[in-house]
Image: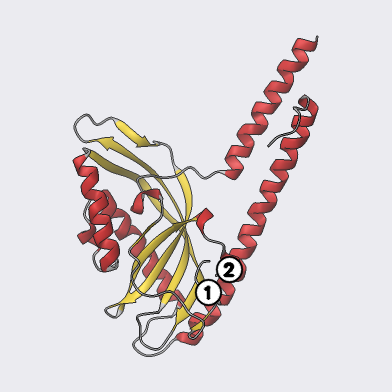
Amino acid sequence: MMEKKMKKHKVIFRILLIVICCMCFTVTGYARAGGGGSSGGSGGGSGSSSGSGSHSQYYGQGGRRGGPVEMIIWWGTFICMAGAGTIVFHYGIQKAKRKSLRSMKSFEKPGEEWNPKKMKKYVKHAYFVIQECWRLLDPSYAEKYLSKSLAQSWTTKLEWMEVNHEKPVQERVRFLNAAPVFAFDKEGEEHDRVIYLIHGRMIGYYINIDTGEVVRGKTSPETFYEYWVFIREDGRWVLDEIRQKDEVDVKRL
């Protein structure tokens, strides 16, 4: 009887664990632009308090083992906390978005593109071009959308992939949304920047060029959030850095 109860508790525990993993973790789409990790060219300067911006700064076990019932309660609490964390995340994004949109509208001037609608359209187009340049192992394909320093950094990374006989595969690439969460404008263009939270989805993995075998990533669709940092370079907006969801605290932007 006791053994049956233990088996039942183990099943419940496993189900809860699966639910938690689905709620709390976003599987990294390694074959997306930048490799699914942080990548930046460090071009341009960060926002400073002397300029006009939508925000003040840039970026910002033990114990005894409990029984099955205690474990269920603990994991249930963890799920609730995870759900609350998701709500807080989206609330923070909406707050940062509203503030950024107000700032972008106030920054509009002849010769500098700050119009929110046009910017979002530009970011969407850039998203697909930049993903394609990564898939092709060719940063020059997106040279109009990458800062010089980021293009140089990616060239090195992609050359290493070729040395390792690896090639990224991208399928069903989708752009779900883009929300501005930071905007900064200063005299001139060298310090201008805007950060967008990109919400995308794709199937992304790497194959061995010689064998066609999948060596990294997953062959199932993956949804992801990333922060894309755009700067002005040579009179146009270009991507200069990619940050992952857990690397940026929008409350400190």
Q: Which quadrant of the figure has residue 88?
A: bottom right
Q: Are marks 2 and 1 in contact (CB under 8 Å)?
A: yes
Distance in Å between CA atoms under marks 2 and 1: 7 Å
Q: Residues within 10 Å of mark 1 (few under 14, many from 20)?
A: some
Relative to residue 157, is residue 51 depicted above or below?
Answer: below
Q: Quarter holding the C terminus?
A: bottom right
Q: Nearer the viewer, residue 243 or 211?
A: 243
Q: Quarter holding the N terminus?
A: top right
Secondary structure, mark 2, is: helix
Q: Is residue 21 visible?
A: yes
Q: Which quadrant of the figure has residue 233?
A: bottom left
Which residue carries the number 2 mark? 252
Q: How is the image coloured?
A: secondary structure
| Kind of residue at badge 1 | Gln
Secondary structure, mark 1, is: loop
Residue furthest front as drawn: 62
Measured as percent of width and height from the top left, residue 28 is found at 45, 44
| Kind of residue at badge 2 | Arg
Label whose residue precedes the other's in the sequence (2 or 1) = 1
Measured as percent of width and height from the top left, residue 107 is found at 46, 86
Q: Residues within 10 Å of mark 2 (few under 14, many from 20)?
A: few
| Residue positioned 29% across, 80% down in the render | 235
Which residue carries the number 1 mark? 57
Q: Nearer the viewer, residue 132 or 41?
A: 41
Measured as percent of width and height from the top left, residue 224 is found at 48, 50
Q: Is residue 5 left or right of residue 230?
A: right
Q: Is residue 65 left or right of residue 105?
A: right
| Residue positioned 21% across, 36% down in the render | 209
Measured as percent of width and height from the top left, residue 215 is found at 32, 33
| Residue positioned 32% across, 32% down in the render | 214
